[in-house]
Image (tube, helix red, strand yellow):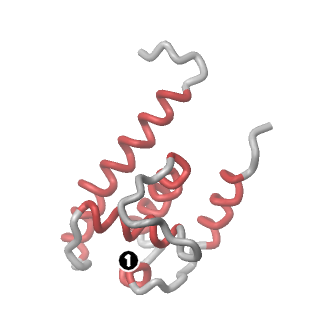
Amino acid sequence: MSSDCGGGLDFEASVRRAFARLTTDDLPRAAAARGWPVRTPDEFERLLLDHLHEQSGLPPGAPPSLFDMVLAVELGERLMSGSLCCDRMSRKMRCADRALETLKALLAQPRQ
């Protein structure tokens, strides 16, 4: 059990684990089962992050922020549930991600 009373370190560690599991295990397994293009974990990470930063983009090799990872995990979950299409994402097409935009705006609000 962590000594962090606020739970911030536990939350960050949980998000990092979820992001790593998503890109190294969950998405590659889903891709193989669904006939999606075969991608490496790094390629899945870049696909998610590029989709999140469609306007500004991230510099190649830039590590994702905690905020990026939270959104990427949500996006990955929606990919695996069939709410989003991996092929459209890889062609940079927007596809039914209004809920993700709402989550992004909510998470971007300053803490009160």
Residue 62 lies, in percent from the top left, at 41, 57
Q: Secondary structure at mark 1?
A: helix
Q: On the rendered image, what quadrant is the C terminus found in?
A: top right
Task: List x then y, in percent, for residue 103.
Answer: 64, 58
Q: Residue at x 47, y 28 (%)?
A: 10
Relative side of 34 to 67, left or right: left
Q: In the image as oriented, which residue stretches furthest toward the right? A: 112
Please name the residue that numbered disc 1 is placed on.
86
Residue occupying the point 66% across, 51% down: 107
Using the image as rendered, state which of residue 14 and residue 96 is in the foreground. Answer: 14
Along the line of sight, which residue is nearer the eye, 33 or 72? Answer: 72
Classify 10 Å Cα crowding around label 1: few (below 14), some (14-19), many (20 and above): many
The vertical placement of 89 against 33, above or below, is below
In the image, what residue type sits under mark 1? Cys
Give the residue drawn at x 40%, y 42%.
16
Q: Is residue 80 above or below residue 20?
A: below
**Residue 102 location, quadrant:** bottom right
16 is higher (above) or lower (below) than 45: above
Counting from the top left corner in percent of width and height, residue 95 is at 53, 81
Quadrant in which the N terminus is drawn: top left
32 displayed left or right of 8: left
Residue 56 drawn at (x, y percent): 57, 72
Number of numbered discs overlaid on the protein picture: 1
Instruction: Residue 101: name its quadrant.
Output: bottom right
Is 35 left, or right, of 54 in this rendering? left
Determine the residue positioned at 46% across, 58% down: 72
